[in-house]
Image (cartoon, rainbow, N blue to C red):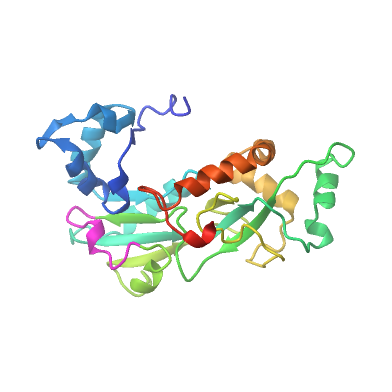
């Protein structure tokens, strides 16, 4: 239903996509090496013929793959930004060239707000700015500006491959190690990594840090960390969510209320899924 207005979208069910790029995984989806025989059960949404067409075109064009987990979001202009970067940077002569892009600045929506907050960050101050301080108090979570210059967060992690390049050429597939394993594109023209920096007070990615998080990192924090967005209040940041991600803040607040009402069942289901096929595995999160 969410994709009915996007005729160019195809949703494919394939657990191997984590270890293979699109070209490689498509080879595994073909039946009897015949491109017209893709298992119908593999295509969860969209046209099989369109999927085959994408695959054929990827053999002669630069292939871009951007990671987006189900509980994250990308700004409305992120893909345009990375496509423009790729068009001018990936080698047009070396068919083995590849390049990686990371979102340097992003935002976390934390399920719990820090215990120690300055007045300008407090829930009461936000309610005053929203004009809802006289109404029922609604838990909203907490928006935290973040930046990562040492590793690459998964949201927006993009890999670009020339026609003879593939995922196996990268020194590592682990997002938190990849920035240290490749030279900066400022220093190398090929086989390099580049951080993408949005304009001031904008963010390329939005991550949800809830109790279902695999790592549980930053789900519960004691204080506010300055990540270059200290001039933005919670009111400013919620407006940014609407402006950059086209997400109405009220839908997030409603989601948190529904999440909280079913929290025990949600957590039991999340725990049951840990360390199963197709899921991340971190026993400490339990």
Residue 172 magenta-drawn? yes
Please say if 179 is above or below 17: below
Which of the two residues, 218 or 125, is positioned nearer the viewer here?
218
* Residue at point 18%, 46% (across, down): 60
Residue 221 located left or right of residue 76: right
* Residue at point 27%, 29% (across, down): 41
Which of the two residues, 261 or 233, is positioned nearer the viewer here?
261
Which of the two residues, 209 or 186, is positioned nearer the viewer here?
209
Residue 261 located left or right of residue 38: right
Residue 56 coordinates in the image, percent (x, y): 18, 39
Main SS, magenta residues: loop
Residue 266 coordinates in the image, percent (x, y): 57, 41
Residue 174 coordinates in the image, percent (x, y): 37, 63
* Residue at point 72%, 55% (across, down): 113
Identify the magenta region.
Answer: 162-173
Residue 205 coordinates in the image, percent (x, y): 53, 52
Residue 28 magenta-drawn? no
Q: Is residue 183 visible?
A: no
């Amino acid at each position: 239903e969410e994709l009915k207005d996007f005729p160019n979208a195809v949703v494919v069910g394939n657990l191997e996509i984590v270890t293979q790029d699109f070209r490689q995984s498509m080879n595994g989806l073909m039946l009897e090496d015949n491109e017209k025989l893709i298992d119908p059960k593999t295509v969860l949404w969209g046209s099989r013929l369109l999927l085959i067409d994408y695959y054929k075109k990827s053999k002669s064009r630069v292939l871009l793959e951007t990671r987006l987990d189900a509980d994250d979001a990308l700004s409305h202009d992120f893909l345009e930004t990375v496509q423009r970067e790729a068009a001018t940077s990936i080698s047009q002569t070396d068919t083995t060239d590849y390049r990686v892009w990371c979102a340097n600045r992003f935002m976390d929506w934390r399920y719990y707000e820090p215990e120690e907050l300055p007045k300008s960050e407090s829930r009461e101050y936000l309610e005053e700015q929203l004009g809802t301080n006289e109404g029922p108090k609604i838990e909203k979570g907490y928006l935290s500006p973040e930046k990562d210059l040492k590793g690459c967060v998964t949201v927006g992690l993009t890999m670009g491959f020339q026609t003879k390049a593939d995922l196996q050429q990268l020194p590592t597939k682990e997002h938190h190690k990849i920035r240290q394993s490749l030279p900066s594109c400022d220093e190398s023209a090929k086989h390099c990594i580049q951080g993408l920096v949005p304009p001031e007070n904008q963010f390329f990615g939005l991550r949800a840090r809830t109790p279902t998080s695999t790592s549980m990192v930053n789900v519960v924090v004691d204080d506010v960390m300055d990540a270059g967005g200290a001039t933005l209040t919670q009111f400013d940041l919620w407006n940014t969510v609407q402006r950059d991600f086209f997400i109405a803040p009220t839908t997030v607040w409603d989601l948190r209320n529904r999440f909280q009402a079913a929290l025990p069942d949600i957590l039991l289901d999340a725990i049951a899924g840990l360390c199963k096929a197709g899921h991340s595995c971190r026993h400490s999160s339990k």
